[in-house]
Image (cartoon, rainbow, N blue to C red):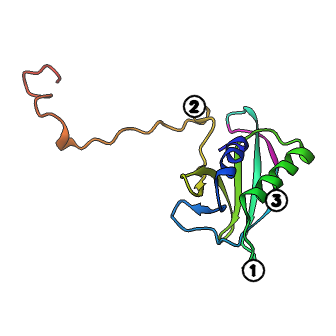
Amino acid sequence: MKLSEIKEILPSLNNVEFQLENGTFVPEHFHVTEIGVITKNFIDCGGTIRKEKVVNFQLWDANDFEHRLKPFKLSNIIKLSEEKLAIEDAEIEVEYQGETIGKYDLDFNGSSFVLKNKQIACLAGDACGIPESKENVKLSDLSSSCCTPDSGCC
């Protein structure tokens, strides 16, 4: 989800809720402790230099049990960060503390923002020699007429 998308959604909400993919909700007394830009300059294993930029939201589960972040307040925090940090419309990455700090993509299910698990993948698979995955086929599912003595396959 891009920053422009969350800005479009917020005015239609009564509450701001974040939910993990497993259905667990971030406690409703969470704080957004940071909004910023993270730029990553790196070289992949194939030698290609790459640059990624994301808008980072950091969620914190504080012991402030009476706190509730309202959509209007989050919109104001986003607006201030755009003004002060010259944030562009980029994909949002959310940091949230589980057993360690997790990084998540952001989605919306119609009522709650969903923290989507991120996956690591090789960006230069052709350069590292990683074989493409092959389709697993059960031998019993193959047609038996394929290799009969008179089929010409042998």
Mark 2 or 3, closer to the camera: 3
> Tag 3, which secondary structure?
strand
- Which amino acid does the dot numbered 2 rest on? Asp
Q: Who comes first in sequence, dot 2 or dot 1?
A: 1
- Which amino acid does the dot numbered 1 rest on? Asn
Q: Is residue 50 left or right of residue 131?
A: right
Q: Is residue 68 left or right of residue 20?
A: right
- Which amino acid does the dot numbered 3 rest on? Glu
Q: Which residue is mark 3?
A: 34
Mark 2 or 1, closer to the camera: 1
Callout 2 touching callout 1 (CB < 8 Å): no
* Picture disc at residue 109: none
Front residue of 74 and 93: 74
Write the residue at 63% across / 62% down: 17
Q: Which residue is mark 2?
A: 126
Q: Pinpoint residue 147: horizontal percent, then vertical percent.
A: 14, 28
Q: Pinpoint residue 42: horizontal percent, then vertical percent.
A: 77, 40
> Tag 1, which secondary structure?
loop
Query: Is 90 contained in the magenta span?
Result: no
- The span picked out in magenta is 37-45
Write the residue at 72% across / 33% down: 47
Q: Who comes first in sequence, dot 1 or dot 3?
A: 3
Q: Is residue 112 above or below residue 153?
A: below
Callout 1 touching callout 3 (CB < 8 Å): no
CA distance separating discs 1 and 3: 17 Å
Front residue of 58 and 47: 58
**Crowd tier of the residue under label 1, counting other residues whose Cα lies within 10 Å: few below 14, some 14–19, many 20 or above:** few
